[in-house]
Structure formats: structure tokens, C-alpha cells
Image (tube, rainbow, N blue to C red):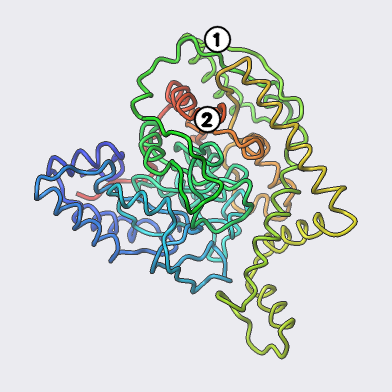
Amino acid sequence: MDLNSLTVESTRAAIAAKQITASNLVKQFYDKIKAEDPEIHAYLTLCQDRALKQAKRIDDLVGKGAPLPPLAGVPIGTKDVMVTKGVRTTAGSKILENFVPPYDCTAVMRLEAAGAIVLGKLNCDEFAMGSSNENSAYGPVRNPRDKSRVPGGSSGGSAAAVAAGTAVATLGSDTGGSIRQPASFCGVVGLMATYGRVSRYGLIAFASSLDHIGPLTKTVKDAAILLGVIAGRDPLDSTSADVPVPDYAADLAKPVSGLKIGVPKEYFGEGLDAEVRAAVENGISKLRSAGCDIVPISLPHTAYAIPTYYVIATAEASANLARFDGVRYGYRAKGSRTLSDMYRKSRDQAFGAEVKRRIMLGTYALSSGYYDAYYLKAQRVRTLLTRDFEQAFQKVDAIVTPTAPTPAFKLGEKSDDPLSMYLADIYTVTADLAGVPGISVPCGRTASGLPIGLQVLGKHFDEGTILRVGNAVFSEIPSASEGSLP
């Protein structure tokens, strides 16, 4: 069986048809991970006992001729910011190096209830803070398309595993573009639903008003299937929305003809790579040919999105990360004589440079005398950005933009320039601030073969439309992995 070509659909179909057992498939994936992942470093922790136990459950259902759940036997990986009962969860940080959670993240529980098999936990920027996956305490992930380049971040391990074929699909998290940007860099599909569509229970918090969980997959239909499984109200998350979940996969069959597609001028200006522009414009031409009405629009407050994001996100991070103090769980520094000394040493030794930077920025923005000037003002600008989208969606059904201003950059290229790194999120942070859904789909490649992503943004809780539009321009890029197991 060609593991590289497997999709969610084809995997379930092969298991249902008894072409392969779930147990055998899992063993083949672990062989592939052990052979190929050391160079890519997408995985941090494998959970073979858990995976094989789930595989046996699926094989027993097949043997009995019982109805199979929608993800029966599909091998997936989860970003290591989602807690998993009995399986080490680090958030890419030394401070949680030996943390083993006593419960499961809701999204992971829903995937397993639907028959999916969790292979392991995926590498990420520390506490999901980064755009290149170089901030992990356990070493960077390499892009399977070009191992000298970053996979994007912070869900770099999630995107790389799909691109390399070491998982059929994965879960990532998106706070400022952390699903969509790595999907663009690695040539896979990355979907971020409306804020509140997917429960955040069990997601280690970075910025609570911005964090999302979503799928990374090889096809748009696979993303639709996974979203249908993990979406929906969760009483364990007070921010999850009680909104009906449609059949996203079935809705993909609806034509895009007649849809009005907005193209914002602010996303096609200075700093956009010429090859990225050409590929995205070609995608827009495909939509026009499919019968869509292309409408020029303006999102006038876009220029303020990056500074707004990096005030709000860092402020929320400084509050959320206060819980990692070396007292209750996580890393505790040795040799401390006083409680305050233990706090200081534990956090200093176990947090990385980028996490410390964001904690300090956020603490400053929330401090007395600066709260009104920074945090309160940023929240007001966030309202203006949200209104930009609301007004635009009175005229159009979806908005198409580049996902990132450039293709994947070299490892180390931006490490010493955090401001340059932050600007890599310039086209993605607006959706998180406004709470609207977004998807990145591959729409072409550069002359050197690097993937290019096209982003589709939609109205609140209208994921069905962005999936349809994304599917209309989707250009599949084959797995980066060489060869497959027999």
C-alpha cells in the first residue's frame, strides 16, 4: 500500500473493504516514521500502545461486520499543545518536558470516538509562539519539500507530517496563522474554523480569545470531514458556540458559480513575492472561469493588524503563562532558597527566548499606566478590523488573498530579526482578530518547486463556503516523501 497517497477517504475505504487491517496500517506508519522522521523531526512523542489499542478496536468492528465510524482506522498526529491522557504533552517547551496529562483534549476525544488512530504528538514552536517552528525547545522541524527551509509555524510539525506522508491528517492550532501559514509553506490544506466552532478544551492556551484548533490534510474534502467530526458545542468550553454543524463534505458538491469573491487591495501591495502573486492571481482566474463574480474590495484597517495582534496576543500570553511557576507541575529549578527565587529561576531556565519576549511585551502592555495606551487601544482597533470584514461580507460571499507574502524561507534566515518574523503573519492575523474562518489551499509552486498557498476567508460560521471556494482552486502537490512501504 502506498502510504504517501492515502487520504482520510481512501484509508477508511481500504479498511472497510478489508484490503488492510488497521493494526497492520499503524505498524507500517510507525516503520515509516522511524525511517524518515529523524531528518524532518515532526514528531516529539509516539504513543504506540494507545494507537494499537485503537487499531484493534477498529479491526474488531470490521470483523463483526459492524458499521464503521467516519474516521475508522485513519492514522493522525496531534500538535503537542493538545493534552492527551497518559501521553507526554510538552507544548514544545522545556517547562513541560515531563508533563503527562490526566485527561484528553475534546478535539482529540472526538477524533478517537470517530475511529481515528493517534500516532503521536507533533513538534511546534514553544507554546505555539512562532512562524517557523524554530522556537521549539526540542529542535526545529524541517520542511519536507526542501529540508533547508522552515515548515512554517507554529504548527510546523503538523504540516510537515502530512506533507511527508507520516500521517494521513493532523490537528494544529491557529492563533495568528499557525495552521494556514505552515500549510502554505508545506503544500497542504490548513483549515481554521470560526472562533467557537471547535472546542478549545484541553488546548494549552497561548491567547485565549484568538486560539483555534483545526485540521491539516492532503485534500479539501479531508479537511471538511475532519472539521465535521471535531466541530460543535462542548459544555467544557464556555466559548464554544451552540451552532448547528452542517455536512461540510456533502456541501462540497455545490457549485461555486454565482458566488461573489472579494479581492482586497491591501493584500496585494508591497512585500508580496512576485511568484506568490502570480499563483494567487491564477487561482482567482480559475474562480472567474468557474462562474464566480470577482469584486475588488478594501479592508482599510489591515495595516494595523500586526501591531494590534502583537499587543493582544502577548497580553493574553503573559496572563496564561503565569500558571507555569514551578509549583504545581512542570519544571522546577533546583537550589532555590526562597519561593520568589524558585519562581524566577524556574521560568528563566525553562522558557525560551521568544516566550520570554512575549511575556515581557504582554506584561508591559497590561501594566499600570500603559493599559489604556496599548491593550485598550488594541482592542478598539480589533473592533475596527472586525467591522472591515462585516462590511465586506455585505458585498461578497468570500475573500481570497495570499496566505503568506513569500514561500518557505531558509532555516535561520529570520531568527535574529523577530520583527521580520512577525511580518510573515501579515495576511493571516486579521482572520484570528475578527474571528472569521479561513483556509489555505495549495495553488501552485515557485520555479524552484516551493509550494504556494491561497487563502480563502469567509463569514462567521460559513465554513462551507470557504471549503467550496478552496476546493475550486485546490492544486494538489504530491507527497514529499520518497517511496513507500509495501
Camera-nearest residue between 302 and 203: 203
Please report contact status of discs 2 and 1: CB closer than 8 Å, yes or no.
no
Q: Measured from the top left, where is residue 347 in percent x and y? A: 67, 73
Q: How far apart are marks 2 and 1 (CA)?
A: 30 Å
Q: Measured from the top left, where is residue 210 in percent x and y? A: 62, 46
Classify 359 as above or below 409.
below
- Looking at the picture, which amino acid does disc 2 mark? Ala
Camera-nearest residue between 129 and 147: 129
Is any atom of residue 20 visible in this view?
yes
Camera-nearest residue between 469 and 417: 469
Please tell me how crowded label 2 is: few (under 14), some (14-19), or many (20+) other residues with Cα within 10 Å. Answer: few
Q: Measured from the top left, where is residue 119 in percent x and y? A: 34, 57
Secondary structure under tag 1 reads strand
Residue, disc 1 = 293
- Left or right of 43 in this view: 372: right
- Looking at the picture, which amino acid does disc 1 mark? Asp
- Left or right of 281 in this view: 235: left
Secondary structure under tag 2 reads loop
In this view, the residue farthest toward the left is: 64
Is any atom of residue 248 visible in this view?
no
Q: Quadrant of residue 330?
A: bottom right
- Left or right of 40 in this view: 301: right
- Left or right of 403 in this view: 470: left
**Residue occupying the point 81% across, 54% down:** 365
**Residue occupying the point 19% across, 49% down:** 486
**Residue occupying the point 48% across, 31% down:** 441
Residue, disc 2 = 447
Front of the two marks 2 and 1: 1
